[in-house]
Image (cartoon, coloured by chain):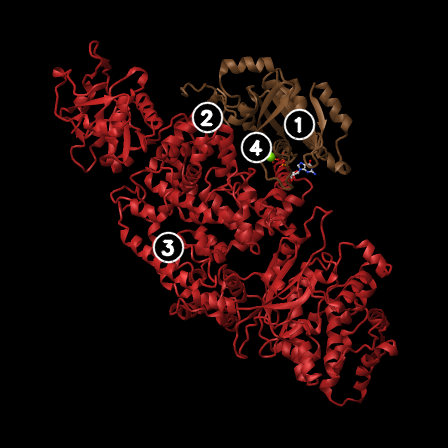
Amino acid sequence: MSFSGRNDAAASNMKPIQVKLVLLGESAVGKSSIVLRFVNNEYQDNKEPTIGAAFLTQRCKLDDRIIKFEIWDTAGQERFHSLAPMYYRNAQAAVIVYDITKPASLEKAKTWVKELQRQANPNIVIALVGNKIDLANNRAVPYEEAEAYANENELLFFEASAKTGTNIIEVFTELAKKIPYEQILANNKNLNSRPGQNENGRVNLVDQDNNNQENGQCNC
Amino acid sequence: MYGVRNVNVFKLKPDNKISELSAFSFVPKCNINSNKNITTNIIGKFQYLKEITHPNLCQYINITKNRKDRLFVVSEYFENSLESHLKECKKITNISRIRKLTFQILSALMFINSHGIINRNLSLKNILLDFNNNVKLDNWGFYDFTNKGKDVQFPIGNPEFYAPEIIKHHKCNLKADTWALGIILIYIYIGHLPFNVDSNLFLEELFEAILSIKKVNNENDSHLTGKKQFCGDLLSFFEDELKEENEDIKIFKDFVLTCLEPDSKKRPTPSDLLCHEFVKELNENSNEGDEVLSPIFKKDFLFSEMVKDIIDNENENSIEKSISNITRYKNIIADEDFNDLELEKLQPRVIFYLWKLAGGDLEYEFIKQELISLPSIYRVKNASQVYYTLNDNQVVNAVDINNSFQQVSDPENLYQEKKILLSIDYLISQFNEYKKFNKKQDYLIDMLNSNNNNYFISKNGISQEKEMTFNEFMKNNNNDVIDFWNSSESIKNNEYISKYDEINKVIDNNDKQSNKEGEIKANVELSYNSSVLDKDIVFQYGRIKLFDRLLNQFPSSWNEFIQEAKIHISPYLRGKIWAAILGVTGDSKVIYNSLCEKCDLIYNDSNINNSNLELERQLEADIPRCHQYNDLLSSDIGHNKLKRVIKCWNIAESGNLVYWQGLDSVCAPFVALNFNEEEIAFSCLLKFIKNYMYGLFKIDNSYYIRSYLIAMSHIISYHDPELGSYLKKINLTPDIYAIPWFMTMFTHVFPLDKIYMIWDKILIGKPSLPLFIGSAIVIQLRSEILNGDFDESVLLLTELSAINIDKCLEKAQLLLRMSPKSIVPDFLNIIDSTKISNDNLDDIVITEDLDTLHSDELAPRIKIEDFKKMYNKSLILDVRNESLLTQSEDNGYIVISPSGSFLQGHIKNSISIPYYENDILPTSLINYIKILNKDYQYVVVVGEEERAIKLAEQLITECIQRVSYLNENNINKETFESWEEPDIWCCKKPESEKFYIDDNSDDAKSLDIARNLSPISPRSFNSDHPFENTQTFIIYKCQ
Ligand SMILES: Nc1nc2c(ncn2[C@@H]2O[C@H](COP(=O)(O)OP(=O)(O)OP(=O)(O)O)[C@@H](O)[C@H]2O)c(=O)[nH]1
Ligand SMILES: [Mg+2]
């Protein structure tokens, strides 16, 4: 069952491939701004903080496929951390963001990488993104340092700016290229459910165990 | 002379005390390349000045900006100034007159200095004179709120009165005013500027003259020297002194000499000068006490006469005294004529508020008088010259200036020194125009009043496509519907409706007539909504007066106050009214100050602990993103206030609650409304979170937030089953979009103006009202959601810009009244009853058990107490039936056998629902239930949990409204024993009803006809039936 809009099905006979993508990273590093730039090509100077999480979608064409990114933009505050597994659990892609002017945000990014490597879908494709390169004058994280870390952990690596738009599309395109589609297609067939919508689509602020039963109800 | 006062001037009789309002306009420095927003910082800094009131100061009233960052400053205004006065009388030589002027100027200066403000803008035209020739200092905060002139690209103050250090070092302190005063005093005494300078080289020579002045101190005499060529008049002013015999004049001249000390280090401050012999006597006789420390509302008297009364009579901070004054005040107000606009009694800021309500537009006033674009040659030259002379170390020539400051295309446009008077004529005529429809006021109030108590269920239900208007709704309601939240069960309201309609008609006709010239268009569309009321000038005037009285009689006026707050909260007094509702008391300042001290200690400590450091960092990230479209909150001062209030909250709640992102947004409305009274903002935040956001800021808030989310989905399915089941089908649960709604009480998802409307209701509503507001938002979007898919619907529910808040609030209150109490989370009901009994919320105990929330269920569970209220209006479906629905082989009829437990005893009038395969009832049976339901308001499923819930869910999916499950697993005689009504538990043998269903038809009519109510024994089931293609059922029903 496809939840994609009617229009795009008409535009192309292909069924878009749904890719669930999650954004993680410290508060105010620019996650929401990156999504806004990618989805609407907009930038807002004082983008309000994300509370809980926000959901957006964007379609793109890659070779002969249409990919529909289902993007979960999460809250950065550490307190919301317990929510995160809900969003990354079935994600095929993750963008972990840090702020090149804030070394602490890279440290936080590293803990996200570790957590994903341990707990997320083993095939998840991760991109590490150093945001705000428009503020290069205040750079506090050297490119090389972050790049070396990314290589070590086999992550895609970019420096980008949501403000100027530099490298934002690239992040998503490169991610899109790396995703093992055959597997997704196979999975989608089996589950017949949207990624991100498993387990009632419910978000549990603390207790994830509560969400471990599958939704047994019939949805027809 | 500067004031252009020819257009629409409201001429005053000399004895009339209506404050005149004036405005001037300027453009702050361009701030394209800096992160700091200079314009909003000016607005932020300005706010404090509004609170500084002194008899010798023109009161600041308002600052606003237009889209191009041009600022408009409104202040109290008086027509005469020393400058205009001198034009008439040439000079002032009467020493006692000069003494009085001097004293009043000094008092004003000392007063603003004591608030940390430097005037540095003293000049003849800034010293205004009121009707009694008292000094009213004007433009006194201009230098201060423009960040010592750094935020503008034109000079502030007249160069004639610049002190030497301003010219030499480009900086100054409060002593610059002392110098300016000295020059001004000579000016008025001799009748002209005491510098003889050529107007061609005006500035160069003027500055040379000022810098040439030196003071020579001999043993018993000191005198000034200076370039004779320029300072002749100045020097001879003092030289004359030797010949003077008059002691008074001697003292006066000595005073001036004291002022004109070129060395600012040696020069006295204005407050030092008050001890000089010249004014000492006046100073000692002045009975001006310190600022009166008062309970929070008291200082907010809006009627200036009363304020004066109180200040005059109050020498000490004694509260008893103020109480007697309040009583007096009360008496004056008590026999008020509600409808007379008593402008002379109003404080200038209230007049300005009403002026704006009446359609006043500052920018338009300037454009009308061609003041924004009209350059004045004199000013251009001097303004730019002084500015660049003072701000660049090398003197820049004109060509360079043009090159390096190209954005300054027209310096005159940067600062429009001319003041325009804001005409009150229009305000008065508008007021009278509105007064014609005076009567509507009473009805509006009646309507609003009744609206709070009466809610009715429309027979057609809510899920109809077309939104009902308030009027239609009132008409459609039927009177016998339960109000679950009020003791009185139903109230008739038709009387109001017809009256209201009549009034509307009258107003409509009147408007059509008077509308010939398109005068009053705005008030034609009278409909029930608060945005209309907020703009209704007569209504607002009455409300301001009323709340002013109630707040000042606090707390004895509490009951009346709450009653009025439920009707309508006046936007002008919203900050105070909210604080009063929240129970903020006069000691908040003391508490807040001590918290601020703690706060400073904690955050300035180099060993700051981790959790505080984390908060500091999080605030650093969040505050610059918090409601930044608002001019106050985006200013540096606003940022600091938000941070400080939140930090203090964090200290006050430490160990209990923690900062979750989003709390900044909750804080925002309080800070914006009480910008000058942080302590009130703080106390409001503290109380609001405690009482209205229970549990949401605990470290582990999952139980509370989930309770909200799950209850909201229950409310939606209960009232709008089609929407509820659709949302469940596409898996769009509130978790996905509504966390910020409840975590921030909607402050994160709406702009402030909408939040004000919502919170006006939340604050005086039941603790569960937010849940219904959330549900009403979703329901308002129902057609878009039903026509959209998951993605589109998520977008809709995150982008709420199109939501009509008035409708939403109306619906929310309606939904609340129509919902059984047990649909909302237990803890909200506990809070409600705790509040009603006035107990302490700290003492309540909530069992935070996630399993009790039943997140997977579509239908709400209701408690027996609610059932008691609704059972006789409910279709009761009993699933305690172990017998299977069976199908007879030969004719395809389905036959229901009677069930054991139902036969033994059941709730009166209930219907036995048979067991069916997979617990999914056939459509025919559902259709039958739909027909029966026409006679009822509610559907309640009773019986064994699992089956009942499944049935309830199926009914909801079939779009049956108000379906709930009675949360009692074992109903029996005892369950109802305590009820007053007899025979609720019925053990009679139920009647059977035979009916025929055409499976292919949804047509209720044909089904109706096919009902056969004659009792049939199941044993003698008759296989003949009169209709083709139908199935026959027999249902057991308690008749
Ligand atoms: N200079 C610059 N600022 C940026 C950039 N991206 C984001 N910002 C700013 O950084 C701040 C935070 O951006 P957000 O997108 O809200 O950050 P976030 O990671 O979503 O934050 P949370 O929702 O709190 O987790 C905002 O004020 C943005 O305007 C960038 O590329 N350059
Ligand atoms: Mg964000």
Q: Quadrant of ligand 1?
A: top right
Q: Is mark 4 within 8 Å of ligand 1?
A: no
Q: On the image, numbered disc 1 is attached to which residue?
A: A109
Q: How busy is the neighbourhood of tag 1: few (under 14 within 10 Å), some, or many (20 plus)?
A: many
Mark 3, chain letter?
A: B
Q: Are marks 4 and 2 in contact (CB under 8 Å)?
A: no
Spatial separation of the CA atoms under disc 2 and disc 3: 42 Å
Position of residue B119 measured from the top left corner of the image (x, y, whole percent): 69, 66
Can residue A110 be seen at all in this image of the molecule? no
Tag 2 and tag 3, C-beta contact below 8 Å: no
Q: Which residue is mark 2?
A: B731
Amino acid bearing label 2: Asn
Residue situated in front as seen by the camera: B732 or B45: B732
Alpha carbons under labels 3 and 1: distance apart: 54 Å
Chain ID, red in image: B
Please, what is the three-letter code of the amino acid marked with disc 4?
Arg
Q: Classify residue B366 by image quadrant.
A: bottom right
SS under mark 3: helix
Q: Are marks 3 and 4 in contact (CB under 8 Å)?
A: no
Q: Which residue is mark 3?
A: B563
Q: In the rendered view, would you say B835 is above or below A28?
A: below
For mark 4, what is the residue? A79
Q: Residue B314 in the image: x percent, y percent?
A: 51, 71
Same-chain check, marks 1 and 2: no
